[in-house]
Amino acid sequence: MKPLQEWFKNPMLAGALFLATVGVGVGVGLLLTSVATRKAESRFAYTTKADIAPDESRSEVWGKAYPLEYESWKETSDTGFRSKHGGSAFRDVLAEDPRMVVLWAGYAFSKEYNQSRGHAYAVQDVRNILRTGAPNDTDKGPQPGTCWACKSPDVPRLMAKMGDSAFYGAKWSDLGAQVVNPIGCLDCHDPKTMALRISRPALADAFMRQGKDITKATHAEMRSLVCAQCHVEYYFKGPNKHLTFPWDSGMTVDKMEAYYDSANFTDWTHALSKAPMLKAQHPDFEVFKMGIHGQRGLACADCHMPYKTEGGMKFSDHHIRSPLSNVANSCQVCHRESAEELTRNVEERQDKIQQSRIQLEDVLVRAHLEAKAAWEAGADTAAMKPILRLIRKAQWRWDFATAGNGNSFHAPLEIGRMLANGITLGQEARIKLARVLSDRGVKTEVPYPDIATKAKAHELIGLKMDKLNAEKQTFLTKVVPVWLQKAKAREDSLPK
């Protein structure tokens, strides 16, 4: 190897070496500056800037100390984005797919089911939906206090005051004047330290039953776990309607089904087939963990709350939304493809999953109607029980695949497996039903009804929608204003 002095005798080589040395020095300097800046930003982001009361549920009070986060949180009221299969706009899902009315016959979801809007509408939408009924002075309505559990930062305040069991066991209408602030700061942050926190006991309880201590979760894990407080599968356990996650044996559709079966749990009995049914809620966290992004260690916040910078300040964007409306700051942080191509990749997965989902829905609608025909033809419980079990298993897989937000993108392989399994189970039920019907003299195909519209599907299952809608309007114009007046009086007495 040549001595260093020999290299410097060549002017071009010496110049190149000099420039390379300067370049490396500048690069290292920028890197160190960036690291120092990020550390400073991190310290600043989690530095408490004001004394906030432990149960302060009004996000606008937090916003005085954390204006950047608060202003971005307010953007969850934006309903302007509509993707091919989702978005933040209002969508009447039953009108788009009336088969669902039949699949949920006898259950409140058959009355009304809309696409979720942003967190800013959490309280308003649960008041407006027909599923919560129309409670008044004489009728306290069909739902328990548990239905408020994930809608508001007023919930941890009330749980601390009432105790978990009393909160869950109350009527939904009993808490209407107390739960008025939509999902906000107190739901995910400790007001004293600003650290991420778990404010709902059901998540911690579920992990504890698995022998896991959630208090030892890392900050990176908490960036998903705060979402998993609500975006999961759950049920109301026992007469007190205790919010419970069915995770004791695992988080897959099969493991949770085994949990429900072992507990002999049923959400409702189907109005047409008399099958003992399960209703999936929104198993987003569980499905996400089964997909490639979850398996590679990403957090919910990485894509739904990506970092942004304003005025030299870096912070998490609290405009929680579909990454498809923010591809540059979410997907393209890691992926180099164009926004159009990335969107096309997502839609391709969603389109293919939807094809299988619709196929399973057709199988299930026919199975429910054929079971109804079998009962009417004189079938007995012994003949029907194994068939109804198959219908329950098939629809559980359909519901689990359908109910989540973004399932077909989060874990398309698992969702595809789930739907294929459901189609097989549903067809097995129909084969057995054909034998039962034939044995009882029904030799022709049970006709598929005209359910081309939501109104026709509601008529098929016997729902009196005019009456339900009129009662709801009375509730919204007579009862809710009283709730809001009481809430205002209470909040006006608090420090601003």
Image: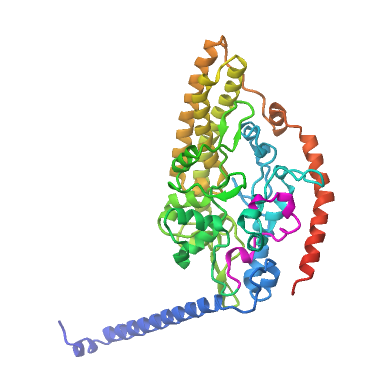
Q: Is residue 173 magenta?
A: yes
Judge whether 376 appears above or below 153 on screen: above
Judge whether 274 appears above or below 137 on screen: above
- Quadrant (top left/top right/bottom left/bottom right) for the C terminus: bottom right
> What is the quadrant of residue 120 in the picture?
bottom right
- Taking depth in this image into account, of 239 and 34 the one nearest to the observer is 239
- Taking depth in this image into account, of 423 and 372 the one nearest to the observer is 372
**Coordinates of residue 456 in the picture (x, y in percent):** 71, 29
**Coordinates of residue 361 in the picture (x, y in percent):** 56, 32
- Quadrant (top left/top right/bottom left/bottom right) for the N terminus: bottom left
> What is the quadrant of residue 467 in the picture?
top right
Q: Is residue 178 magenta?
A: yes
Judge whether 395 appears above or below 479 on screen: above
Q: Is residue 492 left or right of residue 368?
A: right
Q: Residue furthest top?
A: 441
**Coordinates of residue 214 in the picture (x, y in percent):** 47, 62
Residue sitting at x 73%, y 59%: 178
Q: Is residue 90 left or right of residue 357?
A: right
Judge whether 74 appears above or below 402 on screen: below
> What is the quadrant of residue 370 in the picture?
top right
Q: Which span is picked out in magenta?
A: 168-191
**Coordinates of residue 84 in the picture (x, y in percent):** 59, 46
Residue sitting at x 68%, y 67%: 59
